[in-house]
Amino acid sequence: MRDIAVIGVGMIKWGELWEKSLRDMIVEAGLLALDDAGIDHVDSIVVGCMSSGLFNGQEHLDSLVADYLGQTPIPAARVESACASGGLALRTGFAQVASGLADVVLVGGVEKMTDVSGSEATYALGTAADQEYECFHGATFPGLYALMACAHMEKYGTTRKQMAMVAVKNHDNGSMNPNAQYPFKICVDAVLESVMVADPLRILDCSPITDGAAALVICPLEMAKRLKKPLVKITASAMATDTIALSGRREITWIESAYQASKKAYEMAGKRPQDMHVIEVHDCFTIAEIMVMEAIGLVEKGQGGPAVEAGLTSLGGKFPVNTSGGLKSKGHPVGATGVAQAIEIVKQLREEAGPRQVKGAKVGMTQNMGGSGGTSVVHIFERG
Amino acid sequence: MRDIAVIGVGMIKWGELWEKSLRDMIVEAGLLALDDAGIDHVDSIVVGCMSSGLFNGQEHLDSLVADYLGQTPIPAARVESACASGGLALRTGFAQVASGLADVVLVGGVEKMTDVSGSEATYALGTAADQEYECFHGATFPGLYALMACAHMEKYGTTRKQMAMVAVKNHDNGSMNPNAQYPFKICVDAVLESVMVADPLRILDCSPITDGAAALVICPLEMAKRLKKPLVKITASAMATDTIALSGRREITWIESAYQASKKAYEMAGKRPQDMHVIEVHDCFTIAEIMVMEAIGLVEKGQGGPAVEAGLTSLGGKFPVNTSGGLKSKGHPVGATGVAQAIEIVKQLREEAGPRQVKGAKVGMTQNMGGSGGTSVVHIFERG
């Protein structure tokens, strides 16, 4: 298996982008990544997107993106793993380069979510859950995570305030990210008093509906060494699955897929959780960040809430988590999220993260999650 | 890059399967493939599916399939390239095994198309075309291929009868395939007199709406050699893209993506078109088979029609094409089609194709196509 490096990154400012179409966004992000890499041609494209069929009436994104980026006839692929589609795209590109099927691969992620009504968006997002045994009976995504939150509060004493502090921390970080959808600070009271979505989760516990795209370029490490950029290696790419429905889990307070994927990633990279200098996790809801912190081994089971309260995951804490602002503040254009997580880590390891830079960051990781934890994709990056 | 072999294949009988859900079908096909391989565990799953979001309100198939096949927590992926999703799934699994990220991979394909109305199915299939520049203006898939058919008839003198003979040949073959949706013969007059869909294409020129699933198991060649089955190697895996919209093409009588993908595949395998003993191509419409024959080099440009009329591609001809019955007779559950094409070639090379066996077949290929040719995936298989 060949060693792999990231040589270019690009993302557009996320938000409600009424003036930009699906193809506009991914092309813009792709061109930014190519420009950052200093190249104008790649051998292959992989695009992560969850549900462009339901959101935009457009599948076949591999052809569309290769076409609109002027890269035909190169091979391309669209991959989908619900909210982990971006992470899966990176892993799919990783396999192509590792195998030698391609040298230089553009990995993109995109979702255009604001062209449909709120109820249509809720339906589309629900397709990440078990349609027949969850959604059909009325479950929504906030509803599923609310069940997990209630169970976590009951079992471990996790508090509403601790969950709110996840949102506050991520908005603190996001306020320093010019590409974030909501680049402003919020306070604990604002979260606690915001409108209820699914008890105990309020609107400021939830990641937003977002239009956005992100892209990066990977290639064999030996090729990357010839460039003048700071070298960022991908030293682990791992994925794991779990039951798609919550009802199949042994316990709903634990994200087994994140545990399994991170375990494999740590083995692959020869690292431990405590070796991580900067970490992006999938905070689709505040409770998700707390549960993932536990599953990937940053803290013991049940200790996620107190750890957030103690500042462990704040910028300047032991484990800075979601320095980009996370899904909460940066936004969550589903298919683009996993790619943008990787971009944040690359920027941190290159020391290009500006006011949110983690000083001396040499090792970082991303955890991208599909559905209520049915899939997790974990990557580890190291400064070369 | 490691050499790769197919060690198990499985598909269910295709049709309008009112009594089977999406998950029922892919699990059944998956279990058949595992059983054929003589194993009960794999390292990774890749599922090809075009539009389960629009057809079934269910995305996140990687989690669903790993879950319902009892394979969690292994990694899984869902890939989409419109009607080439199955071929892309095989190529994605190929990259995983070639890179060493996985040893034994289950590659599946599935589509459950009959749970929606005809107009909803037409809309869903249209998402393989350019939504903004084709579908929005009223184009349907039969309409796009009708444009190509008219141009081919005008430029090369291809006749309605030649197109009809593609359907007749494929039904002849499909009548010997117990898993085909329409396992019966038809005659030229039946095609020519069938109801018009998009002039000049009539209903019997079109592949049907189908529920179906198919799966196969691949692993490193060295591992496959230890099994007692006839050895079938995958000696090439190639893909190419073209503009998603017909309007972007230099000529609409030529499928550039099939030409590019087959060219790369021939190079990778060290083979020429004339080395192929059995070939499955993407006959979503009769004209598509004629155009693909030309693009992959079985005949010269414009000679597809006369070649079919002369029996070149019939069972017993020089290049037996679509011995399985093709999409026309076997059915076209979009995401499953590319996987089922590979299964037919494996069965032919193992000499398990029964009455439709091509005697002494040692080398075969598949060509799976997305949209109106926006993508093509080509694989070459050889008896070990």
Image: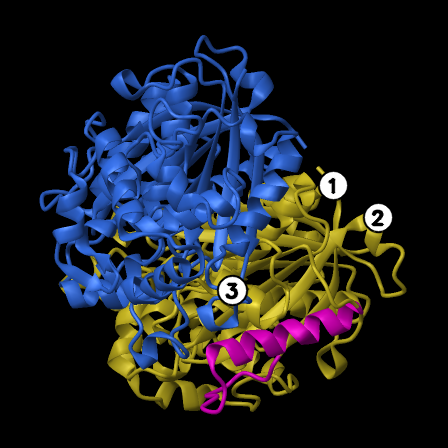
Chain colours: A yellow, B blue
Question: Callout 2, which amino acid?
Answer: Glu
Query: Is residue B162 left or right of B361 when viewed as pictured?
Result: left
Image quarter for residue B137?
bottom left
Query: Is residue B107 left or right of A348 when viewed as pictured?
Result: left
Q: Earlier in the sequence, mark 1 or mark 2?
A: 1
Residue shown at 55%/33% (left/top)? B273
> Where is the N terminus of chain B found, in terms of image quarters?
top right
For the view shown, which residue lies furthest in the left direction? B19
**Quick one: SS at disc 2?**
helix
Where residue A222 is drawn, which disc sits there? 2
For the view shown, which residue lies furthest in the top direction? B228
Of A42 and A118, nearer the camera is A42
Mark 3 nearby-residue class (10 Å; few <14, some 14–19, many ≥20): few
Label 1–label 2 contact, CB within 8 A: yes
Magenta residues?
A12-38
Magenta segment includes A25: yes
Question: Callout 3, which amino acid?
Answer: Glu
**A347 relative to B86, above or below:** below
Image quarter for residue A299?
bottom right
Which residue is the site of mark 3?
B251
Task: Tell me which chain the residue with mark 3 is part of.
Answer: B
Which residue is the site of mark 1?
A2
Q: Spatial distance from mark 3 to mark 2, Cα to Cα? A: 40 Å
For the view shown, which residue lies furthest in the front direction? B157
**Quick one: SS at disc 1?**
loop
